[in-house]
Amino acid sequence: MAAITFRGLTKRFGVTLAVDRVDLSVAHGEFVSLLGPSGCGKTTTLRLAAGFLRPDTGEVLVDGNIVSSPEAVVPPERRRMSMIFQSYALWPHRSVFENVAYGLRLRGLPRGEIWRKVLAMLAVVQMEGLADRYPGELSGGQQQRVALARALVVEPEILLLDEPLSNLDANLREELRFEIRRLHQEFGITMLYVTHDQAEAVVTSDRIAVMQAGRIAQVGRPEEIFERPRTRFVAEFIGRTNVLPGVLRELGSLDLGPLVVRAPNAPEVRVGERAALCVRPARVRLRDAAIPEARGGELPGVVERAVYVGDAMEYLVRLAGSEHRLRALTPPDQRFRAGQAVLVALDPARSVLIPDEAG
Ligand code: ATP
């Protein structure tokens, strides 16, 4: 078993509050991503987990045992954890084999066993033919595979990964995302993964913890975070979304000023309060206003911009009689032209209402 728990974890650097009362539990064998913009405290949280930093307040526990507190920190090498950094941190003057073997040699394993384990792990990351190469003779993706092998070969119970794919090109990132997920499933290791890339977090994780200014804004399964964001920050950070701010006049109807739209119920928003309706562009339905067909609840609008984006069309639509603009993604064969009058359907069941903290 290797569950990791943060309880009220706080870390300051001078006047900067990098990590602010973070509570999070990662279950044994679970894959959790810390996702957030630059400077929100992700790396600091990971370094606190690894034992490289001492918390100002709060604790890190592994299987219920305190491994970090303001009083004492169990050093990284005694934590049954491995950490993978952005920079891979391979030793340039050691071969691939020696890079991977290092942790096993430190533990004093017999030569035959080291040989066997290293070769088996290189096969897992599909690098078995390159054991004699040096890091300088490898591509970025191959170096990253070596870093993964080196971290996994010592059979850690917890693997901490800090933006491990950030130096790779888009195709390789995508390939290695699935690779990391596969390794997680194969080894069942508890993983905590830092990234600012929402697509990466969605593909790899069992749960995502979205961080904002040192705090965890929301934790949940990728679909929950995507479909049910609880704050505007989370809604806007995870993928693109339309945000329509207004006032909840009565249950089910949000007053946007000149317009009223149907809204789902949300326990956090009471009648009379400010709120924002968040609708993903792919959830906005458009149809030609010239085709007579009465359907309730549609809003008239005008297409301001139409862009072909390959597998979809992206439209910017201004709602008539207002300054509100919505993005809509439609199948590529559903074409409207700029200036065309359309009717916009916003299905309350496919949107979320959140308190409008931005006012
Ligand atoms: P990024 O995605 O850019 O790596 P991050 O979310 O990982 O960002 P952290 O590296 O944890 O963020 O930094 C959180 C805050 O703490 C930032 O304001 C950063 O400048 C500050 N910080 C981090 N490490 C130190 C340090 N050693 N000394 C001083 N300030 C630091």
Image: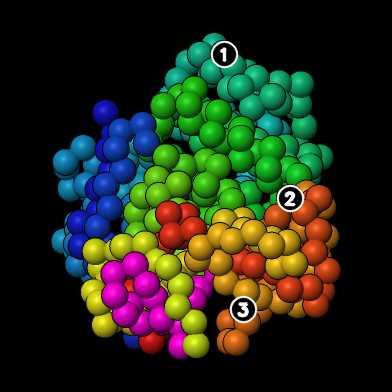
Label annotation for residue 319: 3
Write the residue at 77% across / 54% down: 334
Within the image, what quadrant is residue 302 found in? bottom right
- Dot 3, crowdedness within 10 Å: few (<14), some or many (≥20)? many
Residue 354 % position (x, y) = 36, 69
Q: Quadrant of the C terminus?
A: bottom left
User: Are the residues flagged by discs 2 and 1 in contact, CB closer than 8 Å?
Assistant: no
In the rendered picture of this protein, how many numbered marks are placed on residues?
3
Q: Which residue is mark 1?
A: 116
Write the residue at 45% across / 78% down: 260
Cα–Cα span, label 3 and label 2: 21 Å
- Numbered range of the magenta stretch: 242-257
Q: Looking at the image, which is closer to me, 17 or 174?
A: 174
Above or below, 277 relative to 199:
below
95 within the magenta span? no
From the image, state whether disc 3 or disc 2 is nearer to you.
3
Sequence order check, earlier mark of 1 and 3: 1
